[in-house]
Image (tube, rainbow, N blue to C red):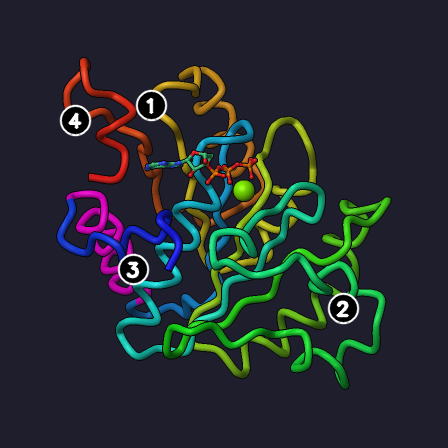
Amino acid sequence: MKKELVIMENPKSSISESIRTIRTNLQFSSVGKKVKSIFITSSVPGEGKSFISSNLALTFAQTGKKTLIIDCDMRRGRTHNVFGLKPTRGLSNLLIDNIEEEFKHYIIKSEIPELYILTRGTVPPNPSELLNSEGMETLLNLLEKIFDYIILDGVPTNGLPDALIMARRVDKVVIVSSIKYTPMDLLVNTKKSLEKVGADIAGVVVNKVPKKSTDYYSSYYE
Ligand SMILES: Nc1ncnc2c1ncn2[C@@H]1O[C@H](COP(=O)(O)OP(=O)(O)OP(=O)(O)O)[C@@H](O)[C@H]1O
Ligand SMILES: [Mg+2]
């Protein structure tokens, strides 16, 4: 199992505890409203979307719910990496295939019970176009019929329309913010632009919090 999957590697750690709390909050926020698709975004690259998405998907699967993680970052996605998979065909390839007939063949069953993965696929020349295509909508509609939870490992908002369009489509949005890298004004702007398009923001995950200031990096996974 890969080291980044802290939920498996170190289930009693405080980071694992925090990720389970995020799961519980998302489950409770679904009272009276369907919460199936959860889009993970951030202000800028590298704040921990893939780390949080993968571990969050794992905690949902651990409750016995059929869970899918989709790597929506067709440019630089690395969800396959987190799960020790090869970057073979995935979302980008599926979106130009016959979606309704073929989608099940693209989904990989992981070693973890109830956890399924759709990797990013071959890096396409037009990821934004694909992500916001009719095909993506068709695909999500099909997947929502099969899975209990769909975690979309997303792209940063970063002044680009991609994340905003997806954020509006899904049931809940989680913003990941790295305490070290994210300037506060960027985070505020991210939240504002998400609100402007009517996204349902579940909350902000403050990631990479140092345990004590002198022990910053080594405390990540503990
Ligand atoms: N809480 C954490 N503890 C330890 N390492 C972390 C944590 N969050 C993220 N990282 C590490 O930081 C790096 C960047 O994280 P990650 O790839 O998840 O960010 P991202 O937001 O998905 O980036 P991108 O915008 O490039 O997709 C990775 O090497 C990841 O392992
Ligand atoms: Mg990522």
Quarter of image, ligand 1: top left
Q: Please determine whether, in this image, residue 176 is positioned above or below residue 202.
A: above
Give the residue drawn at x 63%, y 52%.
72
Residue that badge 4 annotates: 211
In the image, is residue 134 part of the stretch drawn in magenta?
no
Q: Please determine whether, in this image, residue 86 is positioned above or below residue 102.
A: above
Assign a secondary structure to mark 4.
loop
User: Disc 4 residue type?
Assistant: Lys
Query: Of the numbered discs in the image, which one, if any, rests on residue 76?
Result: none
Give the residue drawn at x 19%, y 20%.
215
- Magenta span main SS: helix
Q: CA distance from mark 4 to mark 2?
A: 42 Å
Q: Is mark 1 within 8 Å of ligand 1?
A: no
Residue that badge 1 annotates: 179
Residue that badge 2 annotates: 94
Q: Residues within 10 Å of mark 4 (few under 14, many from 20)?
A: some
Count of residue discs: 4
Of labels 3 and 4, earlier in sequence is: 3
Q: Nearer the viewer, residue 69 or 138?
A: 69
Of labels 4 and 1, earlier in sequence is: 1
Assign a secondary structure to mark 3.
loop
User: Disc 3 residue type?
Assistant: Ser
Q: CA distance from mark 2 to mark 1?
A: 36 Å
Query: Of the numbered discs in the image, which one, if any, rests on residue 29?
Result: 3
The residue stretch that appears in magenta? 14-30
| Percent x, y of residue 13 | 16, 47
Q: CA distance from mark 1 to mark 3?
A: 25 Å
Of labels 2 and 1, earlier in sequence is: 2
